[in-house]
Image (spheres, coloured by chain):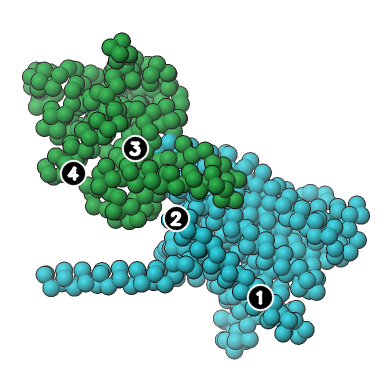
Chain colours: A cyan, B green
Amino acid sequence: MIKNRTAQGYLLNTLVIAALIVGFAILKNTFGKAGDFKLIFAPSIWQCCYLIILAASLNLTLGFLGQLSLGHCGFMAIGAYAAALLSLAAERAGIYEDKKGAAFILVLTGCILIAGILAAIVGLLVGVPALRLKGDYLAIITLGFGMIIVNIINNLPFAGQEGLALGSASSSLYKNGLGFGTTLKVTYIWVAIAVTLISLAMMFMFVRSKYGRAIRAIRDDEIAASASGINTSYYKVFTFAYSAFFAGVAGALYACANATLSTSSFAFANGGILNSTFVVVMVVLGGMGSLTGSVVAALIMFFVNYQIKNGVWVRALPVWLQNVFNFPMLVYAVILIIVIMFRPKGIFGTYELSLRNFISDIKHSRQLQLEQKQAKEEVRSNG
Amino acid sequence: MAETKRIPILETKKLGITFGGLVAVSDFNIQIYPGELVGLIGPNGAGKTTVFNLLTGVYKPTEGSVLLNGEVLNGKKTHQFVNAGIARTFQNIRLFRQMTVLENVLAAFTKDISYNMFDALFRTPKFWKTEKALHEKALDLLSIFHLEDKADSIASSLPYGQQRKLEITRALATNMKLLLLDEPAAGMNPTETAELLECINSIRNRFGIAILLIEHDMSLVMNICERIQVIDYGVTIAEGLPEEIAKNPKVIAAYLGE
């Protein structure tokens, strides 16, 4: 019974993803020659991909495990630098000449994997002491760890404060190592999409297994979880490291999508799109405990960010508002406040968008609303 | 058989704990034999729940020891106590509120699930087999308390009485030998209490487990407990059969004042 319904779901999801990819390929071929795709859509897709992985991976700790971590971008920085430096080393060792062919794909895959593993190891080292704390204290200590990581990278002789672009390792990532130019971003766009899909699938499998049940139990009531035989510290540290792994993978994609790497882009509160608060906003907006919610929220936040920076309509606004938009953090803060006021559980809550159950879920929620309405009316008529 | 029956499943020796200078429990000795139902009573603040916390590893005893089947459990963590075979419910219900009824029970199976990360990621046959078996087992356990229809409801949406029952079901799912019930009838009306009593008896018969019960409802305690231990200010003041306890002048004094 269970298995058949699940098989249906897998089949449906695979079909839809395949249809999306085919549709995308047609779009790409139609508009591929025009500059728009190369200059706007392809970089946007890269950015969306690492944002989706980043948001979904933080959701594992924040939404499913219920532990507020503010150092997520620290793990991403580790992934980004690991991937960039590794690819530079591989190029210098002569493993690949130009960014084509099987050797380069192999290096690319290796870089992404090792970036994730390295981030996971650091996540483990941070998680063991940090996860003894809870709530605000954990938030502060992870914030601290995030800053420490960025500072350590800053002071590495081969990475350098000025970032990899001007550091001693290489004149520019753009010409060496990962760091795709616009043409390569179009060529390797499938890498970004494939990595995102695989990462999401891995997170779904994790959540829908004993691991997911255990960590949601810990989120709901840690004392009851340990009284039910769940080794809470093991599952907490494991999830923290698992989530750091995907932050590292997102970092590797970031390194691919950018010509230069600089630690300031991973700092806690920079003006850009990549800071730990921004990631938290994405998770809260999408719904803590909903991976599909994180995906949607990442896309929304990307769109907001893009419009603030590049939207034509912005120029029509009064000057003071344009000045506010120069500090995107303010805009994100307002978004966060609005979400918390009007929809404290986020867009999706803990609901997972499911293609198989989409229609029946809508019917179900309609019915619930109707029942609630009726119950209220009954109370009113009785009163 | 007579010989093996004399070995207590749970034994504490001079168990005690002090918080700062306050002696919460001292010199607490109890033996519980397989299949027995023992009551632990005492006035408010007597230290009953503290005893439970000592028996489940939430607090570490400052003196004495806890033995389960002869194995010393001192210094172990709560989940290791559960693995050894002691499960409990809480005075103020602690469910996994945002999870479904079924998931609440499934979560308690976690320690017995042998598949690993690889099986979970690649959905191996072992994964499906384990999950399917556990689903059936969980529904089977839920049917004891007639909760199987509610399997897909969110735990916090259940009425109070059913939340209590779900908590007991979850404790049963840990596959324990000794069940500690902390005021299971608190906040229940007489009908619900009677129903609960029936359920406690039926799970005892079905699983052959020992139960240690904290309860304020005297009719319930006197009805179902085979032995009763009374504590006041952390000290055992009486133990014995229900009839003896009811007549014990020390117990009457502790409850009603002298």
Decide: few, some or many residues near mark 3? Use Cα within 10 Å; few <14, some 14-19, many ≥20. many
Residue on which disc 4 sits: B187
- Amino acid under label 1? Val
Q: Is residue A336 above or below residue A169?
A: below
Left or right of A316 on screen, residue B152: left
The chain under label 3 reads B
Q: Nearer the viewer, mark 1 or mark 4?
A: 1
Q: Nearer the viewer, mark 2 or mark 1?
A: 2
Residue B89 spot, x, y in % from top left? 31, 37
Q: Are marks 2 and 1 on the same chain?
A: yes
Residue at coordinates 44% horizontally, 70% vertically from top-left? A358
Q: Determine if residue A306 is in view.
A: yes
Residue A2 numbered mark, or none? 2
The chain under label 2 reads A
Left or right of A144 on screen, residue A334: left
Q: Nearer the viewer, mark 2 or mark 4?
A: 2
Answer with mark 4 or mark 3, whichever residue precedes in sequence: 3
- Amino acid under label 4? Gly
Residue on which disc 3 sits: B171
- Check disc 1 and report its element: helix, strand or loop: helix
